[in-house]
Amino acid sequence: MGTTLEVLLLDQAEQLAELQKKLGYTFTDKEPLLLSMIHSSFAFERLEKSQHNETLEFLGDAVLDLTIGHILFTRFPKKREGQLTRIRSALVNESGLATVARDLDLGKYLLLGRGEDISGGREKSSILSCAYEALIGAMFMDSGYEVVLQHVQLTFTPLIDQQGEQLIHADAKSRLQEYLQEVHNQGPTYILDKEEGPAHDRIFSVSARFRDEVLGSGQAGSKKEAEQRAARAALTSLTSLALLKE
């Protein structure tokens, strides 16, 4: 017999209070906060209904793009669109968001299925980054844009200050797009070649292609990160070819 969100809210009350203290924000409605910490593996094993954080993750992804875009637009009014896009992409990629999640110790508060927990799910970058996006989505649902913007400013502004120029060069997809557009006036495409594993622990295989030629491939626990890895592989390959021609 599965449990309900109402029962979980009682069971997790102490954990949720601790997480809110770390965030510096108290939720009016605790249910979105709880949902943001529920991985699909836990929902499958333990809940009466399949309620988990994937929809909130979708919302949080969009909210992060908007709030970080707002911060960068205000902070760097003279930078070009491509530069701002690269900084934002580098901040919100899987590894970047997982680092922020680890700073909050989000792994401690995740509700995972038994198998996922045993296999080290609390430390997986794909799970942590998705949980952080879901948490942002939950905050947005609870209090709206201004509260999330304040949190994102406090969290990401130090990273932007420390790594601003480095971040411009960190986003492989943007760099590959710019290179191919400059040389061939046409960008790459990303093809999802394969999905493997159970629904709560998918591995995505993606190839970066240009005019039907595979330039590079990548695998990761999210499509976005697999695309970044494919782009990095493509850039490495293109750089090698350029050196050979010299």
Image: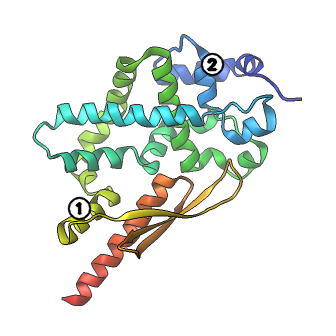
The residue labelled by disc 1 is 178
Residue 104 appearing in the image = no
Eyeballing the image, is 51 above or below 244?
A: above
Please state if 51 lies on the left or on the right of 36 as rendered. Answer: right
**Residue 33 marker:** none
Sequence-first tag of 2 and 1: 2
Sort mark 1 into few (<14), some (14-19) or many (20+) by Cα contacts within 10 Å: some
Marks 2 and 1: which is nearer the front?
1
Locate the C terminus and report the quarter of the image it occupies: bottom left
| Residue found 29% across the figure and 57% down from its top | 174
Outermost residue on the right side: it is 1
Q: Amino acid at mark 1?
A: Glu
Amino acid beneath label 2: Glu
Total marks shown come to: 2
**Is disc 1 placed on a helix, strand or loop?**
helix
Residue 47 in the image: x percent, y percent? 78, 30
